[in-house]
Image (spheres, grey):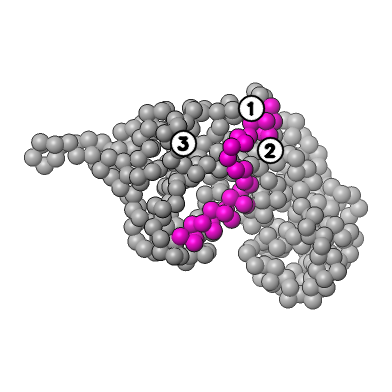
């Protein structure tokens, strides 16, 4: 069973990039116009494990900060670990011991300041027992539970796996589902790559997946494999390479434990192309070393150059030298490189346009950017 086979045709499918764009536009418009956030329905994100639902919330928060000037705080609640009393609070006697008083749960301790936007992220809601889902009714629609009320500056977003994903998932009651705006999150290599370049994902991971984008996600609900590729799993591989050892041979077993043996072997074999890549310091110093020949090596070189450029993004002399080197690349790969450069930070394209060679390339070959991955 493929991911396509289990999609719900009754709700919109969006990749993470489009999700952030559409929800960001909606939330920023509401916030900047002074309209209460409660007028917008709570959102439910559906999708297979590891597709990037949690990561999308963090990116959405940054988007809101960038476009509203406000600070965002995220309260991440894993509902699978909660019971109904955890949401309502622990009962205790009032001062004269005549009534029960419900102590406010920590999740409701939010900053009500006008300069803040709070996110209440109810993750794994579809895995929670129905008694906990029922307790979420009031939160998603009325923004209250029992005596406790969310502040006016709070956005409520829930997320969970689909029952068809063979993960822990309980069918959502109709009364709860009708209180939510539903979106199914789908994988998109382009959207993932933009995030990966900007977030410092290891260049070997980015290079390999640029060469084999079909390996970004290999989740199959019908497969019993414990280790498989997802955007979350590749981020874990990146963390191993960035913080344990960049030598794939030395950490191969750890990588195989994340994405599975078969894919780890292919990743390790592909990474041998790095042995013959030109020296990055030579490229950015303007020495113009030879261009690699193979397609796999070119994807590796583009990823390595992008990682180096990200770490030296404000040194425009060195960036200019790399642009001059890229002019000698096959046009399709110079397009891949320049598109990746534009992912380094928002509006980095404006910095590149100050480089005459980049402007000239854009005028003559810029159309190739539309097909670059």
Taking the magenta stretch, the answer to whether it contains residue 2 is yes
- The residue to which callout 2 is attached is 217
Indicate whether 146 appears above or below 297. above
Seen as rendered, the residue at the extreme left is 96
**Secondary structure beneath disc 3?**
helix
Q: Is residue 218 visible?
A: yes
* Quadrant of the image containing the N terminus: top right
- The residue to which callout 3 is attached is 177
Q: Residue 99 sits in which quadrant?
A: top left
Disc 2 + disc 1, Cβ < 8 Å: no
**Secondary structure beneath disc 2?**
loop
> Which of labels 1 and 3 is toward the front?
3
Residue 221's tag is 1
Q: Give the range drawn in magenta.
A: 1-30
> Which of labels 2 and 3 is toward the front?
3
Neighbor class of circle 1 (other Cα within 10 Å; few <14, some 14-19, many 20+) is: some
């Amino acid at each position: 069973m493929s991911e396509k086979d289990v999609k719900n045709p009754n709700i919109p499918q969006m990749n993470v990039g489009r999700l952030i764009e559409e929800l960001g536009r909606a939330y920023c418009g509401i916030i900047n116009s002074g309209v209460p956030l409660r007028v917008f329905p709570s959102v439910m994100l559906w999708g297979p494990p590891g597709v990037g639902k949690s990561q999308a919330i963090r990116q959405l928060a940054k988007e809101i900060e960038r476009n509203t000037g406000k600070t965002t705080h995220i309260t991440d609640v894993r509902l699978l670990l909660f019971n109904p009393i955890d949401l309502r609070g622990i009962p205790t006697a009032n001062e004269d011991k005549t009534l029960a008083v419900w102590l406010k749960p920590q999740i409701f301790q939010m900053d009500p300041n006008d300069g803040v936007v709070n996110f209440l992220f109810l993750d794994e809601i579809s895995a929670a027992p129905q008694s906990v889902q029922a307790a979420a009714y009031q939160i998603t629609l009325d923004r209250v539970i029992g005596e406790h009320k969310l502040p006016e500056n709070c956005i409520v977003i829930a997320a969970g796996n689909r029952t068809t994903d063979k993960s822990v998932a309980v069918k959502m009651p109709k009364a709860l589902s009708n209180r939510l705006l539903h979106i199914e999150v789908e994988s998109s290599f382009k959207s993932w790559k933009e995030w990966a370049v900007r977030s410092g994902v290891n260049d070997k991971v980015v290079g390999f997946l640029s060469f084999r984008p079909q390996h970004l996600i290999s989740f199959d609900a019908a497969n019993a494999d414990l280790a498989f590729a997802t955007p979350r799993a590749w981020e874990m591989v990146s963390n191993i390479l960035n913080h344990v050892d960049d030598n794939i041979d030395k950490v191969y077993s750890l990588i195989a434990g994340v994405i599975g043996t078969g894919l780890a072997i292919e990743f390790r074999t592909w990474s041998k192309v790095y042995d013959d890549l030109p020296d990055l310091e030579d490229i950015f110093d303007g020495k113009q070393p030879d261009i690699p020949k193979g397609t796999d090596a070119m994807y590796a070189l583009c990823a390595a150059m992008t990682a180096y450029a990200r770490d030296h993004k404000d040194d425009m002399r060195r960036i200019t030298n790399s642009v001059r080197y890229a002019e000698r690349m096959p046009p399709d790969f110079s397009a891949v490189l320049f598109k990746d450069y534009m992912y380094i930070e928002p509006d980095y394209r404006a910095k590149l346009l100050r480089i005459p060679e980049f402007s000239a390339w854009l005028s003559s070959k810029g159309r190739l950017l539309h097909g670059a991955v």
